[in-house]
Image (cartoon, rainbow, N blue to C red):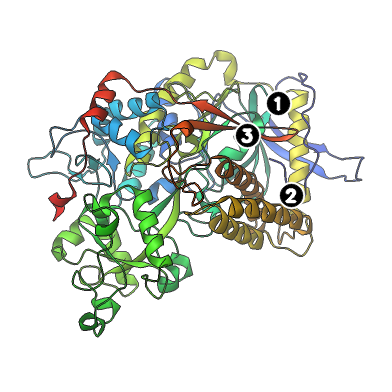
């Protein structure tokens, strides 16, 4: 990854220096600018390096281990502390526990409809067809799914789904699922290295030979030598000012690393804004954008604006109930109401706020207090506890919510049966990739994709590993490229200007929220690109406080990744002159059938290139389900 300030990152000629182990102290220097910095780093060899320790990375690693390999998993945080834990509401599978009519082709049809038919049908069908087996597998591994009275895995409604197919563990499904996967990984004794940030993949543009990074606790350089790298490092929603991720996750690492290596990105203009994030002006900055799970609406939660009648106003906003503000989804989606597609509900909330019917804090109200308090506490324990800590009893009073950047449908372009990226030795999986979700993700499908596709990717990679991959050598060319990267990191850590990386990240987040947010137009997107160029120029005056173990340095590396992804998002959003799913252009408000094409992004020395690719058609069983026109009957919840 090109650092800030930019350094010469050319690809050296490859030679062979034999195997290397242990710590390598070498003297680095650059005669062109007079730098002379010592480079010291550890070399770690592994047959497969998995970058990312969430559900997708864990499932790939499990499959590799069960095939007899010993992959190494690296993550930026402590083991088990991954973004998967924030996926609270559930995971989809057509089990038919409550609705026996449900089946995988209907699940696939719902996914394609929600994705506005930009999805890769083969990826969708792989996910939908195999999820029942993956749920049963998780159950066998000890995941404590909620149960029906007769002992079946319970399922709830989620937005835009024809049947109750979302399996759950209260409102902490992702957390329990990741714990289950980690328990399985530990039982298989899969090696894991915590607090590691990868900053560059070693590549000559056609294949990957390892990765370079640093230990975030010690600052030590790390060279991972391997012939097989799996990117499972998540998406880029945290590049936005208001988002449901932590600030130090989902910064676009996977996409930026892949693009630089020669892989393609796909459909990056599609960023999902979840309808219900917490409103920071009400609950505090640390809670701004944090997710209020879709399970609240799946269990019957209702959305109201702030148009409170005089008789209700005396009770204050905390007393708001179904008799208070207008239940505005009746105007936008009278049939599916609060459980319409996420993009529909998010735009409806944004419109209510824009037209002055929002709360004083810029949100709307989400109310589930009409349900039995014990039922709420059983189904939504995390939400109950969180809001109680903030002084709100959701069994009696509403929450204030507003849209938040939540998930990125776009990402690395892969073959979903193999995870291959087109760069030899580089694979990708999970939110790092694009294809399953199309223009908008069906709630409950993110966790599903991680384990369904993760198994396929792990199986394929295991078949590519040979005996020679157990102890790959470090060539002269790889060593030279790695040392150039370590010098660039040292230069970045020594930056002594006047601009803090965190300040630039905040400005970048505001830029994306303003110019590439829920509502977009040509003028705003072009202004965003101009502002991005100005922000890049400011990085010449960057100041890093502390060494390579500091948060300031971490933010500087995050910035280098997020700047790449921000340009890709702005350019693809400008290119797509229609509205489809999560991409809404106010100057092109209609969906254009001619734009039922994917946008592909590649990068070379001259910059970014965009081109279109047609979308394949689904299989006959899925076409039949689409023609049948299955649809959620929201009023089952009334």
Image position of 186 (left or right of 142): right
The answer to whether residue 82 of the structure is visible from this angle is no
Q: Quadrant of residue 473?
A: top right
* Residue that label 1 marks: 20
Picture residue at 75% right of the left edge, 51% below the top:
492
- Using a 10 Å C-alpha cutoff, classify the residue at mark 3 as few (fewer than 14 neighbours), some (14 to 19) or many (20 or more): many
Q: Horizontal and vertical percent for residue 12? A: 79, 27
Q: Horizontal and vertical percent for residue 478? A: 73, 27
* Residue that label 3 marks: 259
Q: Label for residue 4?
A: 2
State how far apart marks 2 and 3 are (Cα).
17 Å
Picture residue at 78% right of the left edge, 24% below the top:
476
In this picture, is 316 found above or below 399?
below
Image position of 284 (left or right of 475): left
Q: Nearer the viewer, residue 618 or 129?
A: 618
Picture residue at 58% right of the left edge, 60% below the top:
510
């Amino acid at each position: 990854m090109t650092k800030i300030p930019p350094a010469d990152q050319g690809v050296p000629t490859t030679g062979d220096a034999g195997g290397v182990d242990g710590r390598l102290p070498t003297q680095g220097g650059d005669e062109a600018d007079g730098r002379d910095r010592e480079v010291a780093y550890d070399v770690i060899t592994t047959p497969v390096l998995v970058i990312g320790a969430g559900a997708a990375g864990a499932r790939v690693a499990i499959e590799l281990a069960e095939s007899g390999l010993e992959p190494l998993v690296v993550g930026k945080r402590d083991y088990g502390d991954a973004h998967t834990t924030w996926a609270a509401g559930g995971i989809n599978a057509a089990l038919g526990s409550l609705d026996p009519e449900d089946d995988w082709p209907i699940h696939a049809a719902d996914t394609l409809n929600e994705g506005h038919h930009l999805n890769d049908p083969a990826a969708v069908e792989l996910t939908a067809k195999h999820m029942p087996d993956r749920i049963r597998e998780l159950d066998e591994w000890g995941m404590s799914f909620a149960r029906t009275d007769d002992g079946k895995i319970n399922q709830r409604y989620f937005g835009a789904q024809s049947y109750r197919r979302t399996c759950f563990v209260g409102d902490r499904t992702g957390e329990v699922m990741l714990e289950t996967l980690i328990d399985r990984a530990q039982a298989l004794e899969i090696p894991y290295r915590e607090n590691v940030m990868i900053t560059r993949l070693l590549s000559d543009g056609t294949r990957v030979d390892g990765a370079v990074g640093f230990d975030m606790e010690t600052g030590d350089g790390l060279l991972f030598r391997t012939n097989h790298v799996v990117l499972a490092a998540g998406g880029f929603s945290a590049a936005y000012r208001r988002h449901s991720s932590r600030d130090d996750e989902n910064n676009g690492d996977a996409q930026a690393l892949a693009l630089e290596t020669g892989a393609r990105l796909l459909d990056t203009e599609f960023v999902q804004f979840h309808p219900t994030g917490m409103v920071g002006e009400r609950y505090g900055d640390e809670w701004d954008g944090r997710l209020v799970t879709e399970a609240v609406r799946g269990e019957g939660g209702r959305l109201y604006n702030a148009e409170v009648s005089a008789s209700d106003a005396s009770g204050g906003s905390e007393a708001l109930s179904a008799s208070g503000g207008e239940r505005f989804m009746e105007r936008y989606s009278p049939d599916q109401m609060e459980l319409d597609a996420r993009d529909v509900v998010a735009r409806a909330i944004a419109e209510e706020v824009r037209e002055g019917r929002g709360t004083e804090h810029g949100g709307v109200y989400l109310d589930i207090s009409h349900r039995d308090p014990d039922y709420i506490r059983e189904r939504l324990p995390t939400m109950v506890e969180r809001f109680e800590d903030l002084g709100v009893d959701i069994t009696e009073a509403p929450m204030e919510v507003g849209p938040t950047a939540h998930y990125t449908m776009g990402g690395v372009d892969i073959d979903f049966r193999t995870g291959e990226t087109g760069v030899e030795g580089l694979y990708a999986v999970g939110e790092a990739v694009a294809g399953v979700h199309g223009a908008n993700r069906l709630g409950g499908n993110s966790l599903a994709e991680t384990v369904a596709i993760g198994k396929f990717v792990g199986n394929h990679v295991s078949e590519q590993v040979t005996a020679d991959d157990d102890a790959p050598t470090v060539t002269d060319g790889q060593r030279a490229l790695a040392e150039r990267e370590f010098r660039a990191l040292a230069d970045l850590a020594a930056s002594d200007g006047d601009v803090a990386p965190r300040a630039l990240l905040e400005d970048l987040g505001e830029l994306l929220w303003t110019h590439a947010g829920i509502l977009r137009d040509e003028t705003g997107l072009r202004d965003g690109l101009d502002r991005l160029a100005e922000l890049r120029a400011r990085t010449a005056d960057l100041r890093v406080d502390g060494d390579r173990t500091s948060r300031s340095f971490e933010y500087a590396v995050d910035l280098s990744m997020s700047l790449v992804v921000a340009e890709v998002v702005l350019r693809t959003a400008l290119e797509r002159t229609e509205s489809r799913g999560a991409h809404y252009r106010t100057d092109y408000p209609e969906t254009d059938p001619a734009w039922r094409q994917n946008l592909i992004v590649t990068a070379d020395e001259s910059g970014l290139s965009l081109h279109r690719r047609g979308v394949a058609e689904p299989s006959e069983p899925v076409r039949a389900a689409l023609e049948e026109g299955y649809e959620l009957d929201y009023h089952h919840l009334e």
